[in-house]
Image: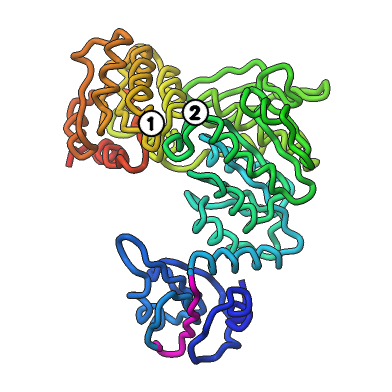
Amino acid sequence: MNTSIKQIIKVVGGDPSGGDLSRSVSSVVIDSRKVEAGSLFVAFAGEHTDGHKYLEECALKGAAAALVEQDVPQWGDMVTIKVANTLTALQDLAAWQRLQLKNLQVLGVTGSSGKTTTKELLAGVLSQKYSVFKSRGNHNNAIGLPLMIFELQEHHQWAVLEMGMSARGEIKELCGISSPGLGVITNIGEAHMEHLGSREGILEAKFELAQNLIPPALMVLNGDDPWQRRKVQEGLPGCKVIFYGLDEKNSIRGVNIHSNERGSTFEVVWNGKSIPVEICLLGAHNVSNALAAFAVGLVLDIEPTAIAAGLGSVRGEGRRLQALDINNVTLIDDSYNANPDSMNKALAVLATYPPERRKVAFLGDMLELGPSSPQKHQQVGQEAAGQNLGLLVAVGQYAEDIRTGAVQGGMENQLITTWPDSKAALRSVESLLPGDIVLVKGSLGVEMDRIVLAVQAGRTE
């Protein structure tokens, strides 16, 4: 990024303080600790802190300008630009910046689960032929996605951007900022049921991506998902569709699937052709995510052998079904987030390990499920009971619901432990034995990563 302060003021419509408006901004940050010479700092007034308190620090670090909502003192040479809403200004500036990248195409990825892994697979495939940028970590919302736009460079040909949402209108907003031409939807699950009320509400929110594409306006959809099939049957005006999946009805299919604790091998079949593929990602469900990336690769004229190589190069992101052999146990860290669908998939991964090794599951609350939360946690308990666990540790507000479901599923009560939070659950780390396979999973707010760190450190506090 290399944009003058004068141009930024023109885009956001702000009221500047004194200073040299011809200076250029080289980066955009919302964390004062990341400010460098030439940065534009965006001050947010949040629940826990107020960015306006850090303006002097930003000026001392060499920030060229700051977007603010309040009347603030002049700090050195830093230009402050007062706007009505700094979030809106950030998004407007990102949308303008995106349009300056004339040779860039954007691929948007959404779904109830598997977004991040699919983003990694897509980037692995596209990078076989193109200069590719991919969004980092959880930068998939109204603040994170704009920040990713500012990191794009002129040489990038494709940006693979993850798009999250918890309410209607949010993906439409992200599309307005990033202008995607291709879209991928992994699945329509039950995440964010609390805010959207029903599976139908989630479906409509996810498909805002299909309704806001620029040419070529192509959606790559999971044809094994009846919700996505139904939506296409209802009609997607102005949008082309390609289906991937395991069912014979799909244009790009996966067959002869074999999964174990190292990953999966399978064949991809399309137009009378086939090719073997191997991915180093845990869980048979990731075959479907890989098929989405394979489909996009074909659309973009990447050689099938190169697509397979790109898929095989992906190792996934941290805290998302990452297996580590440490302290004489195998730790499966899936602590980043959880919903009913991803919880069942993680338990299925645990089941792929040899039966002679004891299997332990630390399962935390799944948040944002609304009134159905007790029932959904009981169902997870029932699923866990069917995995021949040697120990089930349920953590959080719904821990007893998980226990109830597990007992109903036939699990012996003495093999189940419940704790009110992840800090208390550290005591169960002491009961781990050499050779155990340990799955740790739960929603981000339950802080199951505390348990991961304890297992990695070989300690409980």
Does the stretch in magenta take in 56? no
Does the stretch in magenta take in 76? yes
Establish if 73 lies above or below 459. Answer: below
In this view, the residue in front, 174 or 271, is 174
Visible residue check, residue 324: no
Q: Which of the 4 image quarters holds residue 97?
A: bottom right
Q: Which of the 4 image quarters holds residue 455?
A: top left
Q: Which residue is mark 2?
A: 282
In this rendering, would 143 be left or right of 133? Answer: left
Q: Amino acid at mark 2?
A: Leu
Q: Residue at x 53, y 41 (%)?
A: 116
The residues colored magenta run 74-84
Establish if 259 lies above or below 316. Answer: above
Q: Secondary structure at mark 2?
A: loop
x, y percent for residue 124: 63, 43
Q: Secondary structure at mark 1?
A: strand
Q: Which of the 4 image quarters holds residue 242?
A: top right
In this view, the residue in front, 391 or 411, is 411
Query: In the orientation shown, which residue stands out farthest toward the right?
Result: 272
Q: Residue at x 48, y 75 (%)?
A: 67
In this rendering, would 328 be left or right of 145? Answer: left
In this rendering, would 421 be left or right of 108? Answer: left
Establish if 72 lies above or below 447. Answer: below
Quadrant assignment for the C terminus? top left
Q: Which mark is residue 332?
A: 1
* Predominant SS along the magenta part: loop
Which color scheme does this rendered protein use?
A: rainbow
Dot 1 or dot 2: first in sequence order is 2
Q: Which mark is residue 87?
A: none
In this rendering, would 148 be left or right of 275? Answer: left
In this view, the residue in front, 383 or 2, is 383
